[in-house]
Amino acid sequence: MKNFKTLQALAAAALAAVGVARFAVVLALAVVFFGPGQFPASAWNGPKNHPNSDNLIFDTTVAYLVEFYPLWFTYNQSATFNRLIGPDKVTSLYQAVVAVNVDTLYCSATLNLTNEPVVLTIPPTTNTYSILALTPYGDVYPSGIPAQTPGTYAIVGPNYNAAVPGITTITNPDNYSSLLFRVDKYSASGVNQSNSAEAFRAALKLVELSLYTNNPSTGAAKIAPEIVFAVPYKRIADNLIADDPIAFLKSLQTSVAASNTPPLAPGPKALSDLFDALFGDGNFGHHDKKKRAQFAAGAQAAHELILENYLTHTGSNNWIHFTNIGAWSTNADGALDRSGISEFLQYGNDIGAAAYYHAFVDDKGRELNGNNPHGYVLAFGPGEQPQASRFWSVTTYTPADIELVPNPEEKYAVASYTPNLQTNSGSISIYMTRNLSQLPAGVSNANWLSIPPGPFNIMLRVYGPEGSVTNNTFIAPAIYRRH
């Protein structure tokens, strides 16, 4: 292990010399000692030319928000622990998680293993489903639950040493994490299995060990009205940072210090301590206007960095594609990447489970805009469809919230499983227009997606990546504006 005591001492010195020492010293040493991802290196590189970049407060705030941004979302979304919950349906009303899709049925829980284990019961099913285990930062870790295997499992915290007799025991790396089930509504061959998917989800159970011992039948997943999931967390965060960045920093500080945040590694701990010493409780008086302005500018600059890093992460045909989702340390800009995923694709799977391609512009780099009277077309030629063991799907989203586009038909995706999908000698064309009346003559409604007036964006998902998607040589086709 590298000597982190040196860094801690230097961080303490920096804290004692606020207004004189440069946060750059702490940041540089953190990168040397702990490697990329522990501190957001690019958050330092980005604002160097900003007029406020000689200010310790500004620099620290930029680094702090980029490093801990995902915690704001997971902390505020964790209303109930150790209970599985899912929406009764998903339409444009759903706002809780950005870039939600309609391919699968959702059911998830935030685990709290501080006091005792929880018992998870998985019923048998013929539906394909996936299990995603995430830390509060969005790091993907092996759930330990065998794929497609029914059974009863006791999930215990890292410090739990007692036996759980008669139940398969799985040890979690943290006391707090998220567990998400996604159940396919269609088989890989296109058979509608929505009813059995609903039955499977409803039969899932999760409950604390003490309650399970008293009644093994308790803890059934709660299927709640969609309105429960209508809180627009992304919009709240974006608006707070734009309009009241000090309030957002207070909220983020609460999230970082919360009991359900895992213990901080030495590098992030030094950053958090430095920010706390500078920011205090965030209640600045009239004489602290300059200080307040520096914190506000740092928060807004960090948010701009997060957006820019995601939106410029483009490859062939202007599609945004990350291969390090949930494994941020594989990239020197890991902290920026994971904050961008929280902003645009929270609860995304790692590349082994799913691949995501996101586009905001067409083949010529022009903004996708529903005011184009003829709409757009995305065409997969023969053999150009992404290879998948489960499915691929295309969804259009609103510009700011990255949510489903409202439309009277409540049709939100075109997928490999879509019934009556029209093909032409092996090619598949997806037409995106404001309404069905703009669809070209002879095109099936199955090949249509609604777009809003004004800007929009498109996401291509591939669940169960295979072939060129797995080895990252797949090229998603360009999006063309129709004339």
Image (spheres, helix red, strand yellow):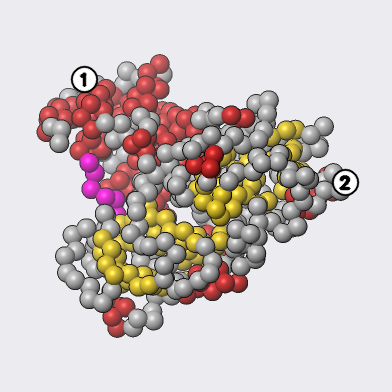
Instruction: Report the quarter where the C terminus lies.
Output: top right
Q: Is residue 477 visible?
A: yes
Asked if one can make out residue 51 in the rendered structure from this viewpoint, the answer is: no
Q: Residue at x 23, y 29 (%)?
A: 30
Residue 239 within the magenta-colored segment of the rendering: no
Q: Is residue 33 above or below residue 49?
A: below
Q: Position of residue 433 (x, y in %)?
A: 76, 43
Give left or right: position of 438 versus 221.
right
Q: In the shown orientation, is residue 3 left or right of residue 441?
A: left
The answer to which of marks 2 and 1 sits earlier in the sequence is 1
What percent of the width, then of the height, locates residue 341? 46, 41
In the image, is 83 to the left or to the right of 96? left
- Where residue 443 appears, x then y in whole percent? 82, 48
Considering the numbered disc 2 on the image, is that residue within a helix, a strand or a loop? loop
The residue pinned by badge 2 equals 441
Res 420 → quadrant = bottom right
Q: Which is the main secondary structure of the residues drawn in magenta? A: loop
Q: Quadrant of residue 303?
A: top left
- At 59% from the left and 53% from the top, the residue drawn is 391
Is the residue under label 1 in contact with that under label 2 (CB below 8 Å)? no
Closer to us: 176 or 314 = 314
| Amino acid tagged 1 | Val
| Nearest to the observer: residue 188 or residue 292 | 188
Residue type beneath disc 2: Ala
Separation of disc 2 and disc 1 at Cα? Answer: 70 Å
Q: Which label number is shown at residue 20?
A: 1
Q: Which residues are magenta?
A: 259-265
Kindly state the secondary structure of the residue where label 1 is placed. loop
Residue 229 image point, x, y percent: 52, 59
Please tell me the numbered disc located at residue 35. Answer: none
